[in-house]
Amino acid sequence: MGIGRFGHAGRGLAIGAALLVAVTALIPAHGAKKIKDKETDVAMADGFRVAASAAKAALSGGDMASANARIAALQPANPLEKYVAASLKFDYAMRRNDPQAIRRALTDILESGATPESQVPYLRYLAGYYSYYLGEQNDAIAQVNYARQMGYKPVESTVLLADAHIKRKKTTEGLAFLEAAVAEQRASGQAVPEAWFDRAIALAYQGGKWADVAKWTQQKLVAYPSAGNWRSGIVNFLAAPGLDPQAQLDLYRLQSATGAIASERDVQAYATLAARSGFEAEAMSVIEAARASGKLTTAEPVSAALLKSISVKAKKDIAALPAQVKKAAAAKDGSPAAAAGDAYFSLGQYPQAVEQYRLALSKGGVDVARVNSRMGVALARSGDLPGAKAALGAATGNWATVANFWGVWVDRQAQRTATLAVPPVQVRPTL
C-alpha cells in the first residue's frame, strides 16, 4: 500500500470489537423476551432475537458454516433488527477476513436506521478505508471526508486522503494532504514515518518538481540522518537538470561531510568535478582519502589517471595562494577575493576562506548567493554554527536549495554540540 500506514486487519478488528460489544448488549440472555434500543425506541421481535442469538453463538463458537446459514436466514423487519443483522454480517466477514463482505456489511450498518450516532463518524471512516483498500478511491475520499465533517479526523484519515488522491493521479492534492499529515503527526509529538517522506520524494522526482524533491529530502534528513539517506538524497537531487556545476560540487562536499561517499563512482564524480572546477588539490585529497579508507585501490584506473594529471598543478596553485590574496586586497571589486575564498575552502582552510568571502561581499561585484552559501559552510566547518546559519539563510535563488541542504547538516552539528555541552550527572554515594 502506498504510504504504508494501514493494515486492514488491525483496523477492522478494532471496530469489530466495538460492534460485537454493541451486538452483545442488544441480544440479551436467552431468558429475556424483548429489548428496546434507547436511541431508536424500537424493539426486536422474539423470533428475530432468538435467531440472532443463535447466529451469535455459532460465531462465538467458531462454527462458521452454521453462523453463515443462520445470518443469511435472518429476516430483519425494523431498523434495530437491520442493525443487528448487519453487525453479525460484519463479524462473520471479519472472521473470514473478507474485505468486500466487510465493506457491504458496513453499508448495511450505516443504512439500517438504528446505528448509534456516536458510532457513525468512525463507521464512515472505516467504510472509506475499506473502499480505499478495495481500490474504490472516489468512494473512499467521499466517505472519509464525510467522517471528517462529522468530527472524526485523526492523522490516519489525512494519510488515507493523501494516498487515495495519489492513486487517482491527483498528485498535487495528494502531496498537500501528505504535508498536512506530516504537520499533524509532528504536532502530536510522534515521529513521522520514513515511508511518508519516501513517497513524497518519489512523486516529486517523477513529476520533475525539483524544489519539492529538495524540500522533502531535507525533511527526511532532519528526521532520519543516516549516511545512506544522505547519499540517496544528494544523488537524487544531483539529477536535477541545469544544476550549476558549482552547486553540484558543494553537494558532493556535503556528501563527504556526512560520511556518505560510498563507492568508486562517488569518489570519481567528486574528484573529477573538483578538478574541472580548478580545485586540483581538493581532487587529490578526495582520491587519497578514498584510498586510505579502502573505497579506492591504487590500481583503479580513472582516479589514478586523474591524480597523475593534476598533481603538478595542485602544488602550483597552493604556492600561488599568498599572491592571490594580495591581489584580492587591492582589487576594485570582490571577484578576486571570492576566488581566493574558494581556493581556501577547497583546501579545508575555512577561517581563511571566511575572511576572503567577507572581503568579497564588502567589495561587491560577486554572486552574493554563492558567496553567502559557501561562507556559511566555511563558518560551520570553523565552529561558528550560529554565524553559519545566518550566512546560509542569506543565500537566495538556486543557491538557497544548496544552502538548505547544508543547513540540515549545520543543525545536526548544533544538536551534537548541545548534547556534549550538558554536564554529566554527579552521583554521590550514600553514607
Image: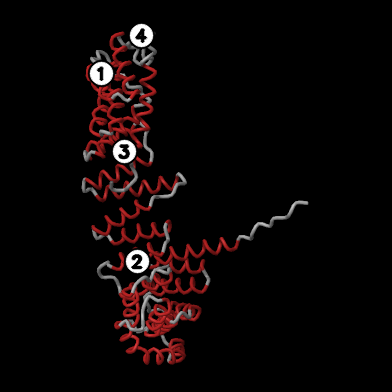
Q: Quick one: SS at disc 3?
A: helix
State the CA–CA distance, disc 4 to disc 3. 36 Å
The label nearer to you, 3 versus 1, is 1
Q: Nearer the viewer, mark 3 or mark 2?
A: 3
Q: Mark 2 belongs to which amino acid?
A: Ile
Residue at mark 1 to residue at mark 4: CA–CA distance: 20 Å
Say which residue label 1 marks: 70
What residue does disc 3 label?
8
At label 3, the amino acid type is: His
Please tell me whether mark 2 sits on a helix, a strand or a loop. helix
Q: Earlier in the sequence, mark 3 or mark 2?
A: 3
- Which quarter of the picture shows residue 93? top left
Query: Which residue is found at the position 38% from the left and 50% from the top?
Result: 193
- In the rendered image, is residue 334 in sight? no
Residue 339 appears in the picture as rendered: yes
Q: Is residue 169 left or right of residue 60?
A: left
Q: Nearer the viewer, residue 419 or 141?
A: 419
User: Which mark, residue 329?
Assistant: none
Mark 1 / mark 2, whichever is N-terminal: 1
Residue that label 2 marks = 234
Mark 4 or mark 2, which is nearer the start of the sequence?
A: 4
The answer to which of 290 and 412 lies nearer the viewer is 290
Q: Amino acid at mark 4?
A: Lys
